[in-house]
Image: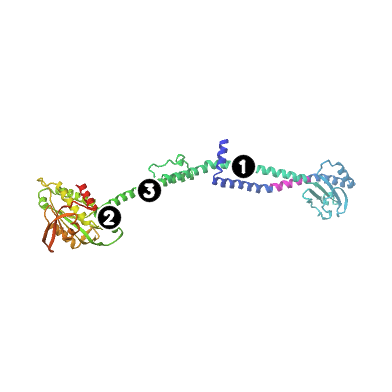
C-alpha cells in the first residue's frame, strides 16, 4: 500500500496528471457544493420547523383554555411557570382578534399582531437569526385571539455550522478518495503508457539511423485500446522511416561511389583545374599560354610489329609502355595530352604555368628513353623511340559536348610534331626555341638546318647529355629522373 501511495503521489509530478487530477477534484467539489446548498437550506428549514412544533404545544394549551372559557392570561402565566430550564421558548404575546395586546411574558416578539392576516401563520427571524418568532392567526384560537411565540434560534445556527463542517469534511474525504483512485488508475491506464511512448520516441530519434533496431518499452505490453493502436502505429511508422532512411543512405552511398568514379574518370581525362572549370561552366573552355613546351614521342616500327603479334598482346604491351610514361609525367608535374596510335603527346607549362617547363619536358624525354629499354620485342630487342620537342605559344582547352578531351592548338604544336617525325631513332630532337631555354643545363649536338615539311629550313639540335654543374632546380629534376629509373 505504501509503495502504491508513493508511486501515485510521485505521479503528480506529471503535468498531465496534475491537470487531470485538479479538474477531477474541482469537479467533485463543484458538484458537492451544488448539492450541499439546497440540502443546507432544507435542513435549516427543518430545524426551524422543529422550533415551531414546540410552540404548537403552547398554542394547543391556549386553544384548550379558550374552549373552556378560562382566563387565557392565567394560562400564559401557567405555561411560563411550567417551562423547563433551557427551553427554546423565550416569551409570548397574546392579542385579541383586532390586534390589541391582552397578555405577554418573557421576551416580547417583534411581530405586530395587527399585521397577522386571518388564516395565515407568520414566521420571522430577528436579531441576526438568533430569534425565531411565530404568529398563530385567530382562526386557530376560535377566532378570538392571536398568539405570537418567540423561540431561541441560536442553537439552530450552531447545529447548522456543525452540519456544514460535517458535509465539508465528507466532501473532502470523498474528493480525496476519488482523486487517489483517479491517480491510481491514471498511472496504470494512461500516464505510464504515455511516458513509455515518450521514452520510445526519444529512443527512436537516437536509433533511427543505427543498424540494430531498438527494443521499445511499449512493445512488451499488448494493449487493445486506443493507446495500443497508437503504439502499434508508432512502431510501424518507425519501421517505415528507418527503412526509408536506410534505403536513402544506401542510395546516397551508391551515388557517392558513382560520383567518385565519375570524378576520378574526369580527372584522368582532364587536368584538375580544367575539370573544376568544366563542372561550373557550360560551353567551350580555352586559354592562351604564351609559352609551353610540347613533346611528341613515337614508337619506332610499331606498325610492323602489329602484324606479327595478336591484337590483345599488342594492346597490352602498348598499355604497359604508356602507363610507364604516365607515371613519369605525373612525377615531373607535366600534363599528358593524348595518345594517337603508338604516338604519345605531353606538355609542360600548362594548365598551371611554370618557369622550368622546357627543362621538365626534356627530363621527361630522357626518362622515356631510359624506360623504353625495359620493354622487349618478341626477338628480344628493345623498343625504340623517336622524340621531338618544341617551345612556343599555344591555345589549350576543351571543346564540344561529348567525349571531352583537353587538347592543344597552334603552330608550336605542329613544329613539335615535325621535330619527332623528322627526328633520329633513340635521340631527342629539339627546336631552336627549346634549345635556347635549356642550353645552359644540357649539352646538344648541333644538327644544323633541316628541311621541315610545311615549314622549310629549321635549325634543330639533338640532346647529348647533362652538364656537370646544375642549378637547384636542375638538381631536383635530375633526382626525380634518378627515382624514375
Tell me residue 49's x, y (percent).
76, 46
Gap between marks 2 and 1, in whole Å?
Answer: 80 Å
- Residue underneath mark 1: 176
Q: Residues within 10 Å of mark 2 (few under 14, many from 20)?
A: some
**Dot 3 and dot 1 residues touching (CB under 8 Å):** no
Name above or below for residue 406 compared with residue 327: below
Residue that label 3 marks: 245
Q: Secondary structure at mark 2?
A: helix
Q: Nearer the viewer, residue 298 or 104?
A: 298
Q: Earlier in the sequence, mark 2 or mark 1?
A: 1
Q: Residues within 10 Å of mark 3 (few under 14, many from 20)?
A: some
For numbered disc 1, what is the local secondary structure?
helix
Which label is found at residue 272?
2
Q: Earlier in the sequence, mark 3 or mark 2?
A: 3
What kind of colouring is applied to the model shown? Answer: rainbow
Disc number placed over residue 119 in the picture, else none: none
What's the magenta region? 39-52
Specify whether 386 is left or right of 67. Answer: left
Q: What is the distance, in whole Å, between disc 3 and disc 2 at their CAs?
A: 34 Å
- Pointer 3 with pointer 2, Cβ within 8 A: no
- Which callout, 3 or 2, points to the residue nearer the camera? 2
Q: Nearer the viewer, residue 205 or 145?
A: 205
Q: In the rendered view, does 306 fall on the left or right side of 149?
A: left
Q: Return the residue found at the far front.
A: 469
Amino acid at each position: 500500500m505504501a509503495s502504491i501511495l508513493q508511486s501515485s503521489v510521485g505521479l503528480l509530478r506529471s503535468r498531465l496528471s496534475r491537470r487531470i487530477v485538479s479538474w477531477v477534484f474541482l469537479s467533485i467539489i463543484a458538484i458537492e457544493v451544488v448539492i450541499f446548498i439546497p440540502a443546507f437550506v432544507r435542513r435549516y428549514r427543518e430545524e426551524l420547523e422543529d422550533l415551531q412544533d414546540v410552540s404548537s404545544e403552547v398554542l394547543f394549551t391556549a386553544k384548550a383554555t379558550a374552549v373552556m372559557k378560562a382566563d387565557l392570561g392565567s394560562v400564559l402565566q401557567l405555561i411560563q411557570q411550567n417551562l423547563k430550564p433551557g427551553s427554546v421558548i423565550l416569551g409570548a404575546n397574546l392579542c385579541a382578534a383586532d390586534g390589541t395586546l391582552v397578555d405577554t411574558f418573557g421576551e416580547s416578539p417583534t411581530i405586530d399582531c395587527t399585521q397577522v392576516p386571518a388564516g395565515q401563520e407568520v414566521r420571522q427571524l430577528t436579531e441576526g437569526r438568533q430569534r425565531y418568532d411565530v404568529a398563530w392567526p385567530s382562526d386557530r384560537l376560535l377566532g378570538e385571539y392571536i398568539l405570537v411565540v418567540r423561540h431561541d434560534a441560536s442553537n439552530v445556527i450552531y447545529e447548522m455550522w456543525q452540519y456544514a463542517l460535517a458535509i465539508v469534511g465528507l466532501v473532502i474525504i470523498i474528493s480525496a478518495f476519488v482523486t487517489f483512485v483517479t491517480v491510481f488508475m491514471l498511472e496504470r491506464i494512461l500516464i505510464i503508457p504515455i511516458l513509455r511512448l515518450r521514452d520510445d520516441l526519444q529512443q527512436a530519434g537516437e536509433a533511427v539511423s543505427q543498424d540494430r533496431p531498438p527494443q521499445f518499452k511499449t512493445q512488451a505490453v499488448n494493449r487493445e485500446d486506443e493507446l495500443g493502436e497508437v503504439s502499434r502505429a508508432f512502431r510501424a511508422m518507425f519501421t517505415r522511416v528507418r527503412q526509408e532512411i536506410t534505403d536513402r543512405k544506401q542510395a546516397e552511398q551508391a551515388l557517392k561511389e558513382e560520383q567518385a568514379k565519375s570524378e576520378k574518370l574526369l580527372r584522368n581525362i582532364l587536368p584538375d583545374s580544367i575539370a573544376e572549370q568544366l563542372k561550373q561552366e557550360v560551353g567551350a573552355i580555352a586559354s592562351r599560354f604564351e609559352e609551353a613546351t610540347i613533346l611528341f614521342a613515337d614508337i619506332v616500327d610499331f606498325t610492323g610489329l602489329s602484324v606479327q603479334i595478336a591484337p590483345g598482346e599488342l594492346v597490352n604491351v602498348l598499355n604497359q609502355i604508356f602507363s610507364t610514361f604516365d607515371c613519369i609525367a605525373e612525377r615531373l608535374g607535366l600534363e599528358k595530352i593524348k595518345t594517337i596510335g603508338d604516338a604519345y603527346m605531353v606538355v609542360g607549362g600548362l594548365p598551371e604555368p611554370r618557369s622550368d617547363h622546357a627543362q621538365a619536358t626534356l627530363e621527361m624525354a630522357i626518362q622515356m628513353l631510359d624506360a623504353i629499354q625495359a620493354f622487349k620485342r618478341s626477338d628480344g630487342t628493345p623498343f625504340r623511340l623517336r622524340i621531338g620537342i618544341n617551345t612556343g605559344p599555344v591555345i589549350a582547352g576543351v571543346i564540344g559536348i561529348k567525349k571531352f578531351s583537353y587538347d592543344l592548338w597552334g603552330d608550336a604544336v605542329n613544329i613539335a610534331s615535325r621535330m619527332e617525325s623528322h627526328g633520329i631513332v633513340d635521340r631527342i630532337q629539339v627546336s631552336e626555341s627549346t634549345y635556347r631555354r635549356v642550353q645552359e643545363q644540357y649539352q646538344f649536338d648541333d644538327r644544323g638546318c633541316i628541311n621541315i615539311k610545311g615549314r622549310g629550313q629549321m635549325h634543330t639540335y639533338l640532346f647529348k647529355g647533362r652538364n656537370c654543374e646544375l642549378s637547384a632546380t636542375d638538381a631536383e629534376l635530375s633526382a626525380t629522373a634518378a627515382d624514375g629509373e
